[in-house]
Image (tube, grey):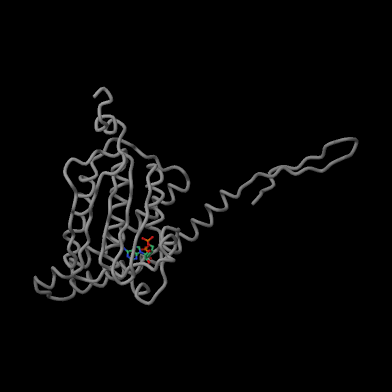
Amino acid sequence: WYQCTDKAIRWIDGRLVRMEIAVDITEHKDLERLKDEMVSAVSHEMRTPLTAMLGFTEFMLENEVPREEQQTYLGTMQRETLRLNELIGNFLDLQRLNARRQSFVFAPLAMEDVIGEAVALFQTASEKHHLVIDCPTGLPKVHGDGAQLYHVLTNLISNAIKYSPYGGTVTIGARHEEEMVIVRVRDEGIGIPTEELERVFERFYRVDNTDRRTIGGTGLGLSLVREIIHAHQGRAWVESKPGKGSSFYIALPVAAKETAESAPSSTA
Ligand code: ADP
């Protein structure tokens, strides 16, 4: 895309030449299109949780609802609020990343702490799934931005829950391998067909089959996960068996000081 910003008439090689000055606005156009796509996807997706919350609050205000029932309704409202919060968070973050205005604050970070916080968010909201943490002690710290990595983990755990049947176990594990800390979020859910494994990280991409049509989403979460992990010089990938479950992995570089400390002494 080019936009004409100025016009001029000049003598060049004895001829009168009419010139137009154009600037490349491809990036600007891409951003504009992305913004339009995002606004329509997000506003569509916001309707479902908002309708649920509105319905439940109206019902509770207009009826004498027994205490146990109230708990159930409040639980649903909490889940829907979380979903809305995640949706808006993804939207804003992707927009900032695209406008290159997202600033990262890197520091040595204990991944087991970030995992603990992310799991705590879902522990009360998802009593229908078992959440298990499987981290060894003594993991080296990674070079990372805590808030961003928390966001990555909440996206992965939220998907693991969303695409699994009730009663399924979601295991969040971590291990140290070749100067990287590898975190795995494993579920026993519907899985992803092999030919779609790479595509799920694309912006707005959602695997299309009947099961998924009933599960809401924008296809933004995993693209954000990958962009954040790439900004950490890390890697994000998935392994999956349809009908058996999926494992999402993120690999993050160990913090520099940790590398030096954990390296064997060269004077031995
Ligand atoms: P959303 O969940 O909002 O659709 P994501 O970018 O988080 O967007 O995921 C993209 C697609 O990848 C989803 O629509 C779904 O088809 C698939 N997917 C993501 N996580 C899982 C998972 N744990 N199990 C099965 N499919 C998944």
Q: Residue at x 45, y 58 (%)?
A: 203
Query: Could you tell whether 90 is left or right of 69 in the image?
Result: right
Tell me residue 9's x, y (percent).
82, 40
Q: Nearer the viewer, residue 195 or 212?
A: 195
Q: Nearer the viewer, residue 56 or 135?
A: 135
Q: Residue at x 37, y 42 (%)?
A: 232
Give the residue at the far left of this rendering.
Answer: 67
Query: Could you tell whether 73 is left or right of 222 in the image?
Result: left
Q: Nearer the viewer, residue 126 or 257?
A: 257
Q: Residue at x 12, y 75 (%)?
A: 64
Q: How many marks?
A: 0
Give the residue at the far top of this rendering.
Answer: 267
Tell me residue 7's x, y (percent).
75, 42
- The quarter of the picture showing ligand 1: bottom left
In which image quadrant can residue 79 be found? bottom left
Tell me residue 135's x, y (percent).
19, 49
Give the residue at the far right of this rendering.
Answer: 14
Up-down: is 82 above or below 266?
Answer: below
Tell me residue 151's x, y (percent).
31, 50
Up-down: is 194 above or below 3?
Answer: below
